[in-house]
Image: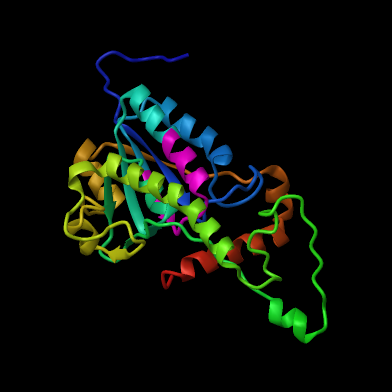
Amino acid sequence: MDLRIPFLTRPPVIPVIRLHGTIGTGSRLGGGLNDAALAPLIEKAFRMRPAAVALAVNSPGGSAVQSSLIAARIRRLAMEKSVPVHAFVEDVAASGGYWLACAADDIWIDESSILGSIGVIFAGFGFPDFLARHGIERRVVTAGTSKSLADPFQPVRPEDTARLRALQEPIHRAFIAHVQARRGTRLGTGTDLFNADVWVGRQAVELGLADGIAHAVPKLKELYGEKARLVPMGQRRGLVQRITGRALFSALAEIEDRAAFARYGL
């Protein structure tokens, strides 16, 4: 029951959704960022009758699809509820992390935040020489000429490289379209913003990738008043994970996160 006392005004409520880590396809019990795990959190934030919703973004990227799904959910609810969304970037919002930041109406960063990497990557390893050196024969039988695409145990084939680039191009175009739609005329001209470069702090602001230098608490208090109540919202671990710690999964997730953040010197 929603009880209201006359003449008492409710201080503005601003849920702060923490988006930290790599973006992947893990389950609700797993770590990382994905739409299935974040959906209840995002939906709850917009049900709180908030004055605004804030995103605390610290992500080096990951899955393009999950980035798109999360950002689309935020935008849909923001429009349905007529609620402004503000993003505050911590260490990095690169690749899919920047895709998430662009779900906000404005983006605020630290002097040392890293932004950008608007591109798509495929990375792997190749072991054909190792197999040959140890006398190991690779046997592959496929129905369909592309079934063994980029097999790490076979030499690189030009047709595989061409096929991978053909797969990357529409994803890259979708990323660019999202950034252009969200940032609009704020994006700078004269610099190629979509070649996967990254920029730091004021460089990103000057190029229109962000709106200014600001931290969450003082900026939100400035926008919504000193009495504004900021409500931190993060993913909760499942019961099994809380009891056991899920040591192996946590270690693997930590390694993945560290490797992704390490690309930006973090």
Q: For residue 35, what is the image quadrant?
A: top right
User: Range of the magenta residues?
Assistant: 55-72
User: Which of the two residues, 126 or 138, is positioned nearer the viewer here?
Assistant: 138
The stretch drawn in magenta includes residue 69: yes
The C terminus - image quarter = bottom left
Q: In this image, 153 relative to 201: left or right?
A: right
Farthest bottom residue in view:
133
- Image coordinates of residue 132 in percent, x first then y, are 76, 82
Q: In this image, 219 relative to 87: left or right?
A: left
User: Which of the two residues, 187 or 133, is positioned nearer the viewer here?
Assistant: 133
At a point 61% along the width and 70% down the height, the residue shown is 156
51 up-or-down from 94: above or below: above
- Image coordinates of residue 151 in percent, x first then y, are 68, 64
- Image coordinates of residue 121 in percent, x first then y, are 48, 60
At a point 29% along the width and 33% down the height, the residue shown is 84
174 up-or-down from 210: above or below: above
